[in-house]
Structure formats: C-alpha cells, structure tokens
Image: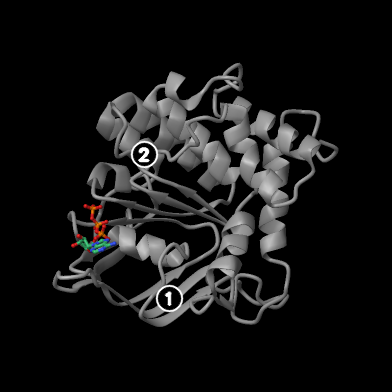
Amino acid sequence: MSERAPSGEGRTGRWARARAALRTPSAPGGAQGAAGQAPGPLVRAEQLVKTHRGEGTAPVHAVRGVDLNVQPGEFVAVTGPSGAGKSTLLHLVGGLQRPDSGGLWLDGERVDAYGEARWALLRRRRIGIVFQFFNLVSNLTVADNVELPALLAGVPAADARASRAELLAELGLEGRERSMPGELSGGEQQRVALARALVNHPALLLADEPAGSLDSKGTREVLRLLGRFHERGQTILMVTHDARTASAADRVISFFDGQIADDAPLGGSRRGGRGGVSGVLELKE
Ligand SMILES: Nc1ncnc2c1ncn2[C@@H]1O[C@H](COP(=O)(O)OP(=O)(O)OP(=O)(O)O)[C@@H](O)[C@H]1O
C-alpha cells in the first residue's frame, strides 16, 4: 500500500493520521470540534432508554435513562452483573439496536434516528465491533474475513490486501491467511476478529465480552492487543462482566439494573486501583 512506512512504523503512522483526521474541524460539539477548541466526545448519549418487548413476555427495561460521554482516545469498560443491560447499551451505541427514546451522537452527529442503511454505512466506516464468539464467517479464509469490511467499504482490493497483511502480522497471525476460522484456537479467532474490526481504521472500537470465551492465555493476549491499540489512540468501549478484564481499561463504568451506578477512572481517587493492561496482566499471571 502506498502509504505504508518503510520502517515498521506503518500502523503507528496510520493511527497518528487517523487521530489527526478525527480532530479535523467539521461538526460543532463533536470530536472534531473547531480548531483551538478541545474536541468533544466521540460518543455522547443522553437519557438513552431501551425496553425489550417479546410476545407473551413481560417487557425488560434493559437500559433506563443512560447519560454517557466517551472522549476520543479513551478506553472505557462497562462492567456489571449478568442481565444488567451492558450488551444492550453497546448495541445501542453501535446501532445494532435502536433506542426507544433519548439521544445518541457519534462524533458530534446525531445518529439515534438513523435507519438501517445509514447505520450499516456508519459501522463500516467508523465503528469496529468484536463479539464474545468472534462471529467470523466460517466458510471464508482468515484473509477474506479480514478484507471483507474493507472491500464492502469500497477500499481498492490491493489496499485491502495490504491492510490485512499488516494487521495479521501485527496480531501474530502471519502464515494463517489461508486457514479457515474453524482451524484456529479461540484466541487466534478473536485476533482475526480484532483485525477485521480494525481494518477500516474505525474511530470507535466496540468490544462485547472480547475475552468471554477465551482461556487465561487468550484473555491476556487479547487484552494486551487492545491496550496496544489504545496506546496508539484507539477509542475503545468494552463491556464485560469480569472485573479483571475491565481493569485493562482506564475508566470503568459500573452498570446495574439498566443504569450507571458508578463511573470512575481506574487509579482515580474513588477506586484507588491501577488501570491499564499491565495491571490486568499481573492479576492474571
Ligand atoms: N432481544 C431481547 N429480547 C428480550 N429481552 C432481551 C433481549 N436482549 C436482552 N434482553 C434482556 O435484557 C436484559 C439485559 O440484557 P443484556 O444482554 O443487555 O445484559 P448484560 O448485562 O449484557 O448481560 P450478560 O452479561 O449476561 O450478557 C436481560 O434481562 C436480558 O434477558
């Protein structure tokens, strides 16, 4: 790819450019605030409400009036017990589900009323998502899985190939391009899923229990990689029920019964702990 740097700095340079692009003035109040102003939140939610209604079952009030700001470059974990509504919140932010009421802004643009087609475009260009069970396309090779979102976004095939090669090398998957997902370990599959989520250089990476089906070695590896991309400026919003996984983030939101019960930087005065991937690695060693 023509913009590849020769010295192994390819992705670092690209992340720096992605960060710079994020800060280019365009929308008032968004992450791209006017020159000289502090950037606004990349994600802003106001009074988000989502109730699941199934036929013949009682409505479930999964998200009950949530206000949330995620700043560019933050690594935020949403943690809480099973059924608290964490995944529903993540799905709302990623447009996989629509709120019943409330407002949602991404990069300063109001998106809660977007239809499916606009959301699909937005996700393709600006949002990467990793899921607990990887969700790779089982009959496509590793290479094709990673290139697919780039090709769908209209990236020329040669550039998609170059990005895929660069990411797979970075994620320790060189030589596995022709493998099928079923031939890989869980940890390897999650790394492929991470490559796929990052191939279009999304402004926002959403992760739903990214280590939820991995053993301790796979968990350490995935959290280390998330930490590495975060250090380069990647904004990450991750949900997990596991406090140790959450400690990889630098801000932890406790979610309980559809609402935010606590919101604090790890290592901040309220928690007194220490955030960051090195913290979780020590805990898991
Ligand atoms: N599509 C749906 N239809 C009906 N109820 C749903 C639906 N999705 C989630 N729920 C319910 O909404 C509540 C919140 O679910 P959600 O998956 O958001 O919680 P969670 O905190 O992510 O839980 P877990 O950690 O177990 O994944 C739960 O009671 C769940 O059963």
Q: State the CA–CA distance, disc 2 to disc 1.
A: 27 Å
Quarter of the image that includes the N terminus:
top right
Q: Residue furthest front?
A: 56
Residue 55 against residue 244 in the figure, above or below:
below
Q: Amino acid at mark 2?
A: Phe
Residue 4's tag is: none
Q: Position of residue 272 (x, y in %)?
A: 25, 54
Q: Which residue is mark 1?
A: 45
Side of 52 where 89 appears, left or right: right
Q: How is the image coloured?
A: one colour
Query: SS of the residue at dot 1?
Result: strand
Quarter of the image that includes the C terminus:
top left
Q: Quadrant of residue 49?
A: bottom left
Side of 134 where 243 appears, left or right: left
Q: Residues within 10 Å of mark 2 (few under 14, many from 20)?
A: some
Depth check: give the residue in front, 216 or 284. 216
User: Residue at position x 14%, y 72% from top?
Assistant: 58
Ligand 1 is located in which of the four quadrants? bottom left
Residue 151 against residue 278 in the figure, above or below:
below
User: Residue at position x 40%, y 28% from top?
Assistant: 187
Tell me if residue 15 can be seen.
no
Query: SS of the residue at dot 2?
Result: loop
Q: Which residue is mark 2?
A: 133
Tell me if residue 76 can be seen.
yes
Specify which label sits upstream in the sequence, 2 or 1: 1
Residue 240 against residue 84 in the figure, above or below:
above
User: Residue at position x 57%, y 61% from top?
Assistant: 120
Q: Position of residue 97 (x, y in %)?
A: 40, 66
Depth check: give the residue in front, 256 or 199. 199
Depth check: give the residue in front, 11 or 53. 53
Q: Quadrant of residue 150?
A: top right
